Amino acid sequence: MAASGKIRPAVAVLGAGLALALTACGANTTSGGGGGGGGATSAPSGGGAKVGVILPDTASSARYESFDRPLLEKALRAEGLEADIQNAQGDVQKFSQLADGMINGGVKVLIIDSLNSESGATVAKKAQASGIPVIDYDRLNLGSTSDYYVSFDATKIGELQGRGLVQGVGDKQGANIIEIEGAATDNNATLVIDGQQKLLKEKYASGAYKVVGSQRVPEWNNQQAGLIFEQFLTANGGKVDGVLVANDGMAGAVVTVLKKTGLNGKVPVTGQDATPDGLQAILRGDMYMTVFKPIAEEANATAKVAAALAKGDRAAADALATATSDDTKSNRKVKSVLLESVLVTKENVKAVVDAGGVKASEICVPDTQAACNELGIK
């Protein structure tokens, strides 16, 4: 059951532009706000115009409570806004109820990271009927009427994942690839796949790589991702040379399966979000790469757009949202702020720490301390 051997070292991980984006980004830390621990609500902060924020869950990724909540609270407060940040905990009905409460409570702007496009579109319609502008945060709601969208360029994230997989697998002919993708209800997941295929479709078409299993995981469920991967691996006789995984949480479930078969560290696994767990796995050699998204930049950009909208200054908001995103369901262009992300392998984990993405103490644990020492991570 030989795999591809030890994972190949990265080459050209950071282009000049991405290196600049990484070193210049704001700190992606949990300082400056509450959250963490999966809390569902946050008392309003600040003393200016009231802005409502609804985050999606605490299960699909650790980022929403660990990073987004405190960073959004800090950024909104810095703009003189009163932030009411709550979490839907993966429940569409609760998402709607939270939105109703904020709308009835008189928020001036509503920022939503929805569980799916349908629920997001419904909330946007209700808010706008009350004269409240809506910002889609992190995920674009297809078929919605939201006024603005702030996120990272999801297609480019997919391109980084595709590049990382190729770097890890190398030029082995007929390499067996398993794809574990994000939820079909998440437009970002679709865009990530589009980006992945920009590079990988030629590999697949030529026969250089062979897809032996590919599935989108409902709700980005980590446990289900592990089960799906294990089924694909078993069906292929335990052979796999690379695993294209959409985020760190699901990648962790894949690594658990690989450990059971003694393949961890021999098969490159991709990820996204640069979570502490994901970065630890990279330092151990169990994951090959992740994608670092400086969430502080996303929070700051969202807060600036929200501040302009709270003042009724659409021109100022438009000046910030210089990109557009395609709502393929409504056939419209949505004014957007699209930020850059960075490919991270073991060689540049330190850059994520230096940029404030995580603390060294979060990733330098007993079984990774030697790697941290080698890389100068303190």
Image (cartoon, rainbow, N blue to C red):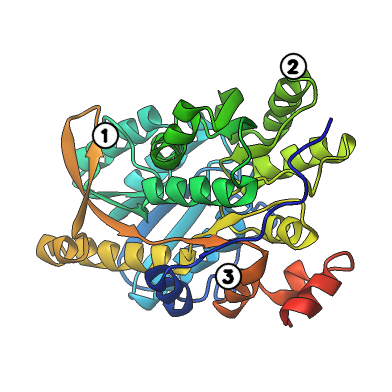
Q: In 3D space, how far apart are the residues under numbered discs 1 and 2 (Cα atoms)?
A: 40 Å
**Foreground residue among 235 and 332:** 235
Kind of residue at badge 1: Ser
Can you tell which of label 2 and label 3 is closer to the viewer? 2
SS category of the residue bearing label 3: loop
Provide the residue designation for mark 3: 357
CB under 8 Å between callouts 1 and 2? Answer: no
* Quadrant in the picture for the N terminus: top right
Q: Amino acid at mark 3?
A: Gly
Q: Secondary structure at mark 2?
A: helix
- x and y percent of residue 351 in the render? 58, 75
Name the residue carrying label 1.
144
Write down the residue under mark 2.
235
Using the rendered image of the protein, determine whether residue 105 is visible from the camera's viewpoint: no
Which residue is found at the position 73% from the left and 31% from the top? Answer: 226
Please identify, in this view, whether the residue under mark 1 or under mark 3 is nearer the observer.
3
Q: How much space separates mark 2 and mark 3, taking CA atoms?
A: 38 Å
Residue count near mark 3 (Cα–Cα under 10 Å), binned few <14, some 14–19, many ≥20: many
Reply above or below: 83 against 89.
Answer: below
Q: Residue furthest top?
A: 235
Quadrant of the frame with the C terminus: bottom right
Residue name at image x 20 percent, y 29 percent: 330
Residue drawn at the location 43% of the way across and 34% of the way down: 202
Question: Is 248 rendered above or below residue 316?
Answer: above
